Structures are given as structure tokens and as C-alpha cells.
Amino acid sequence: MGNNQTGINLEGKSAIVTGGSIGIGSAIALKLAEFGSNVAINYRKHKEEAEKVIEKVKDMGCKGLMIQADISNFEDAGKMIDNVINEFDGLNILVNNAGINWDGVIWKMSEEQWDSVIDVNLKGYFNYIRTVAPIFREQKSGKIVNVTSINGLRGKFGQANYSASKAGIIGLTKTVARELGKYGVNVNAVAPGLIETDMMKQASEEVRKMAVEEIVLKRIGDPEEVANVVAFLCSEMARHITGEIIKVDGGQYI
């Protein structure tokens, strides 16, 4: 707990990481615990993976909690946050990470494809921010980090719904940063490029090669590299940073 070599210390803090059972979310949950934070995650389908993450959190000497919750459901968000506050005796950090994609070109995209992605990726973030905002406002402290994507900054062929949702998160981040700033709450976002998640590992060699060609550093990122930036933004080292969108993409956006 509390790795002083980096200057990041989250001991005594409590965090929620949505979508924390797999991929970037699990890396963030474990990184926050590594620096001393208690961590709660939600899961929808990946119960076994969630159990493993929470087990590792507890092995690091922190409290861990997993809750089955659909982030697109406003009531689920409220119940989860109430449970976490009761279990951890407070809340200091919210990391909105859970997301889905359902790709298709705009002239073939169904209403269901559009609604599903917007409901999870954008409304899901609203649900959690809306619920924690009065809590953070009253305690005059808190850190909110939203995981967006470089495709919310530039667009991506076949991802009108996903790119729109991620662009919406950027607008949401900047607005909430303005609204909560005077209450001592920092609100930022990280925008990953291609990251080595399970989905990327299953991609063909051709797809991987095309992706690497687009990245200035000529390598696909690791989930922990995103988690490092999130942990920094959740710490007091970043107390004068708010409303920022930090790309973690190896120069892919350039």
C-alpha cells in the first residue's frame, strides 16, 4: 500500500471503478489498490473475473467490494454507491470506465445499436456522476476520472455510436469540472488509443500490424499504462489539474 517512490498515495481513500472486472478497468482497480485505496467494482456478466480482481485487492491489504449492477440503469447506480459508502464509510474517487461497442457504418446502423452504446457509454457515466456529485460537493473533495477514447476526439469509420458517446464524455467531463471546481473536486478524462485488451489479443496479425503503423511509438499500449495515469489523476499530485483530456495512445492521435 502507498508506494512512496512515485509520490502517489491513496491510503485511506475509497474508490468506485465501473467495469472493473476486465481489461483497462481491472488494471485501474488494481493500480488504485496498489497505492492504498479501497476499491469497489461493478460487473454485469464477468462474475468470476470480478471475484479475482477483488481477491487481489484484498491481498494488497485494502477493502474490496464487487456489486452486480447495470451502469445504464440510474437506480442500479444509486444502490451501488449507497452500498459502497456503507461498506467503506465514505467515497473519494469515481472512475467511470465501463463501456461497450457495437460497430456498423451509419447507413446500416440500427436504432438498437445506437441506443445501446449511448445508454452504457454516456448515460452510464451520467448516472454515476449525478449520484456522487452532491456527495463530493458536500464534502468539498473528490476525484472523478472518465475513460473516453481518442476516437471521441477524431471519429472512427464504422463507430458513429461509439465515437459520439466518447465525444459526449469529453463534453461531460469539461462541464462537470466547471460545475464542481469551486467545491474542490477534480474532474478529468483519459483517452486511450489501442490498448492490449483481450479483444485486441484476438485480432488478426494483419489488423495488429495496421494498428501499430498508426502509432508513433510503434507498439500497442498496456492497460497498466492507462491505469498509471488514472492513479496520478486520483492523487493529490494532480490537485491543480481539472477539465483535462489526457491521451494515452503512443502518439496514435497525432
Image (cartoon, rainbow, N blue to C red):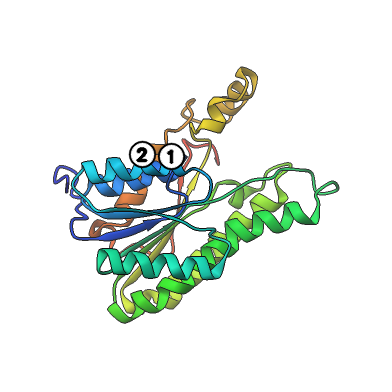
Write the residue at 49% across / 25% down: 218
Q: Residue furthest left?
A: 4
- Identified by mark 2, the residue type is Lys
Q: Which residue is mark 2?
A: 52
Nearer-the-camera pick, 207 or 100: 100
In the rendered image, is residue 167 in sight? no
- Identified by mark 1, the residue type is Glu
Q: Residue furthest bottom?
A: 138
184 is higher (above) or lower (below) than 105: below
Q: Position of residue 1 (x, y in %)?
A: 17, 46
Write the residue at 44% across / 77% down: 179
Write the residue at 31% across / 74% down: 184
Answer with the quarter of the image where residue 214 lies. top right
Which secondary structure lies at badge 1?
A: helix
Q: Position of residue 181 (x, y in %)?
A: 37, 75
In the rendered image, is residue 81 in sight? yes
Distance of label 2 from label 1 (alpha carbons): 6 Å
Q: Residues within 10 Å of mark 1 (few under 14, many from 20)?
A: few
Q: Position of residue 140 (x, y in %)?
A: 29, 77
Write the residue at 51% across / 66% down: 76
Q: Which residue is mark 1?
A: 48
Answer with the quarter of the image where residue 211 lies. top right
27 is higher (above) or lower (below) than 204: below
Mark 2 vs 1: CB contact within 8 A: yes
